[in-house]
Amino acid sequence: MRTIKIIKMTLNELFPEIETFDEGRLRVSDLHELYYEQSGNPDGKPIVFLHGGPGSGTDPKYRRFFDPDFYRIILFDQRGAGKSTPHADISENTTQDLVLDMEKLRGHLRLDEWIMFGGSWGSTLALSYATSYPDKVKGLILRGIFLCREKEIAWYYEEGGAHMVFPEEWERYKAQIPGVQPGSMVEAYHTLLTSEDERVRLPAALAWSRWEAATSKLEDDGSLTSKFEDPHLALSFARIENHYFRNKIFLPSDDYLLREVAKLQGIPTRIVQGRYDMVCPIGTAWELKKAMDLPDEEFRVVTAGHSALEPAIRSELVLATQDFKQHF
């Protein structure tokens, strides 16, 4: 039986900070307008960063996974997230909407094809777009694989999974909904997060967001929990994430994406996965590897948790963007 070895290597650092050469807004519906930005080489090879959540938005540090001399680096905030408007809005906000938004953005930027770079929910969205428009995808760099199946949601948001590893954080998370019935955490939070009373809505958003932030790193340094204490971020993150998860990310079946990835044969793909990822456990990444028939060398397992900015994951992602230059 084959085993996947944990990668041990010299850490690759992020590229230096850079400024954008273009920022804009794209109207994608009567309601929603997206913020997007471009940095790096205007004539470079296009690569798009897909943020997590859904609902978390982008950050300038995400530009730094990519060689700015080689890549045309595209970041955008998905519906309701970051600088996109209306903020934290869950109406007209589905996976299909986001896929169509990406295609509109590609057309707006006059790109023939691009590389998808996404982790966690970003990996879900990358796969959703790629299976819809495989001829527009030059490559896939995926991290912390998430397919939003019932067993993945139950592992993380119900008792019996991640809560056994982070009992103290689980108590904070559960305190917002005392007496909730087993298996009803997501639905109970939905009631709070959609309340018309901000005094109900905001504490729930902060608790939901803290749960993910506090469980995302192998060694928690407090940086993520501090970031997610920002009410603006917490509200969009919690409301949109909860909206998607209670609706099974608007896909027709639990295993839909896993079956659809057969369409992606021949598209260069690399998966980077933390061995101790408690948010998106490695078992899902392994199932995707097998469904895509990826060679072992394109399935990189590192000693880390979930966050893209943990040293070992960060290093492998930078290496992947360097390695993928060969595909142009």
Image (tube, rainbow, N blue to C red):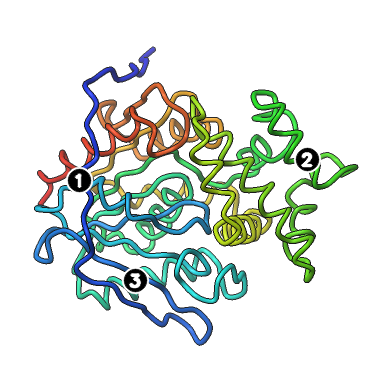
- Mark with earlier residue (3, 1): 1
Which three-letter amino acid code belongs to the residue tagged 2?
Lys
- Give coordinates of residue 88: x percent, y percent: 59, 67
At x 73%, y 28%, the residue is 160
Q: Is residue 165 above or below residue 254?
A: above
Circle 1/circle 2 CB separation < 8 Å:
no
- Mark with earlier residue (2, 3): 3
- Give coordinates of residue 127: x percent, y percent: 40, 52
Which three-letter amino acid code belongs to the residue tagged 3?
Glu
- Residue matched to label 1: 16
Disc 1/disc 2 C-alpha distance (Å): 40 Å
Crowding at dot 3, Cα within 10 Å, few <14 / some 14-19 / many 20+, comes out as: some
- Residue matched to label 2: 174
Q: Secondary structure at mark 3?
A: helix
Residue, far right: 179
At x 44%, y 37%, the residue is 307
At x 54%, y 76%, the residue is 86
Foreground mark, 2 or 3, reads 2
- Residue matched to label 3: 103
Identify the image quadrant of residue 211: top right
- Mark with earlier residue (1, 2): 1
Crowding at dot 1, Cα within 10 Å, few <14 / some 14-19 / many 20+, comes out as: few
Foreground mark, 3 or 1, reads 1
